[in-house]
Amino acid sequence: MPRLKKGSPEAKAWGEEMKAKRAANKEETAGGIPQNPSSITGPGPEPISVPPKDESETVAVKKSFLEELQKTLESNQKDIQLLKSVADKRALARYYERNRKEVPPVVRVRTLDIRDVAGNAITKIVMGWRTIKDEVFKDPRSQKWVEEQIVEILFQDGKTQQMTLLDFNRRFQHIRCNRVGTITDETTKQMALKLMRLDNGEELVIGVQFVN
């Protein structure tokens, strides 16, 4: 290239050309790092493989907590079984017969001390009772309202006796019996209890409404 004279038009033109080239090179590169990676050919970086996340988790708990949880689940299962089984009284009786240990074990039966014809006191077991008179009236002498309730009591020997409800409630006593089973009448669907006296082992069958 011929030597250009400083200040000449040719030198100025050459200087402007060089300045433009340097500016273009500066835009292409900044600190040695290409500004437009797409202009560089060659293999790109390999993708990094990330292992899949394990969704399963392990939680440490005390053995006593697991045992208590298992007991609760078993109890709930029994409650569900009971609800499904007791659609009627007959089903309830069958359920209690199969699960006798879960039935309340002890019930109370009423007794009355009765005088026989000779005047001797005899303790009789009450098998049931029914109301035969239930009236409310105004006493003509005292002008007070009076309630008269008469019940007929059925004893174990098949005999009956009538007395006021108030007298019956004052006089009866209890004996304790083990509950050993249930019986359901096929016609009336009423349920009775099979009992065993705790004092002498005697077996009784009495309607469920006449205990306790």
Image: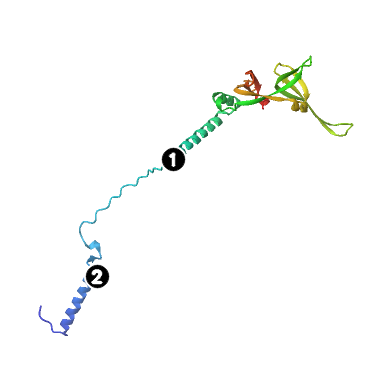
Q: CA distance from mark 2 to mark 1?
A: 68 Å
Tell me which label, 2 or 1, sits earlier in the chain.
Answer: 2
Three-letter code for the amino acid on which mark 1 is drawn = Lys
- Under circle 2, the secondary element is helix
Q: Are marks 2 and 1 in contact (CB under 8 Å)?
A: no
Q: Which mark is residue 62?
A: 1
**Residue at (23% x, 71% y) in the render:** 26
Give x and y (percent) for residue 157. Answer: 71, 16
Displayed quadrant of residue 58: top left
Q: Is residue 19 above or below residue 125?
A: below
Three-letter code for the amino acid on which mark 2 is drawn = Glu
Q: Is residue 129 visible?
A: yes
Q: Which mark is residue 44?
A: none
Display coloring: rainbow
Give x and y (percent) for residue 130. Answer: 73, 24
In this orientation, which residue lies closer to the viewer: 206 or 61? 61
Displayed quadrant of residue 121: top right
In this orientation, which residue lies closer to the viewer: 53 or 98? 98
How packed is label 2: few (under 14 Cα within 10 Å), some, or many (20 or more)?
A: few
The N terminus sits in image quarter = bottom left
**Residue at (20% x, 73% y) in the render:** 22
**Residue at (20% x, 76% y) in the render:** 19
Residue at the left extreme, as displayed: 2
Residue at the bottom extreme, as displayed: 7
Q: Which mark is residue 27?
A: 2
Q: Is residue 192 above or below residue 14?
A: above
- Under circle 1, the secondary element is loop
Q: Is residue 33 left or right of residue 209?
A: left
